[in-house]
């Protein structure tokens, strides 16, 4: 697959678990479980769901602000770099708009 054929953004089996609690009692919160999608160039994706359903967490993983546990985000077929590095390598895949109906 060439870069022209690859999806602009591809989420592959994204999951996110957060640790909650302290030293004595530690729980895990499963915020996102096994989300996958492909977004072609020139298209738009809307994540819609109830409050607390993981929409913001998925968006934060796609733009590189959160690490999936497990899963992968690919930009034009290449894994999204995370962590330190030049800002252009960590820039969001596209504009992200967080909206509230209230």
Image (cartoon, rainbow, N blue to C red):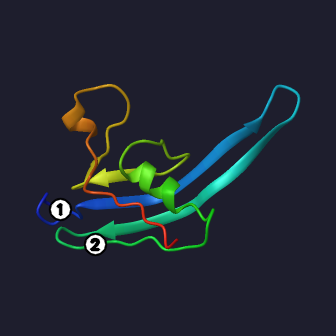
Q: In this rendering, is residue 98 above or below 23?
A: below
Quadrant in the rendering for residue 7: bottom left
Residue 27 placement (x, y as % from top left): 79, 42
Please rate how many residues cluster around mark 1, counting C-alpha atoms within 10 Å: few if below 14, some from 14 to 19, many from 20.
few
Nearest-to-viewer mark from 1 and 2: 2
Q: Are marks 1 and 2 in contact (CB under 8 Å)?
A: no
**Number of marks:** 2
Residue at the front extreme of this rendering? 102
Residue 44's mark? Answer: 2
Q: Is residue 64 left or right of residue 87?
A: right
Is label 2 in a helix, a strand or a loop?
loop
| Quarter of the rendering occupied by the N terminus | bottom left
Q: Is residue 71 left or right of residue 62?
A: right
Q: Identify the residue at horizontal 25%, vertical 42% (top origin).
A: 91
Is label 1 in a helix, a strand or a loop?
loop
Residue 56 placement (x, y as % from top left): 49, 57
Q: Is residue 7 left or right of residue 99?
A: left
Q: Identify the residue at horizontal 82%, vertical 25% (top origin).
A: 23
Residue 58 placement (x, y as % from top left): 48, 57
* Separation of marks 1 and 2 at Cα, in angstroms: 22 Å
Please rate how many residues cluster around mark 2, counting C-alpha atoms within 10 Å: few if below 14, some from 14 to 19, many from 20.
few
Quadrant in the rendering for residue 46: bottom left
Residue 51 placement (x, y as % from top left): 61, 66
Residue 1's mark? Answer: 1
Q: In this rendering, is residue 20 above or below 35?
A: above
- Towards the viewer: 38 or 99: 99
């Amino acid at each position: 697959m060439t870069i022209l054929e690859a999806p602009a953004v591809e989420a592959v089996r994204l999951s996110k678990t957060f640790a909650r609690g302290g030293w004595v009692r530690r729980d895990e919160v499963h915020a996102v479980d096994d989300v996958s999608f492909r977004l072609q160039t020139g298209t738009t994706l809307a994540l819609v769901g109830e409050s607390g359903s993981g929409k913001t967490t998925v968006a934060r993983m796609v733009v590189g602000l959160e690490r999936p546990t497990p899963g992968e985000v690919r930009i034009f077929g290449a894994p999204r770099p995370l962590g330190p590095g030049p800002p252009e390598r960590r820039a969001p895949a596209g504009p992200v708009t967080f909206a509230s109906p209230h």
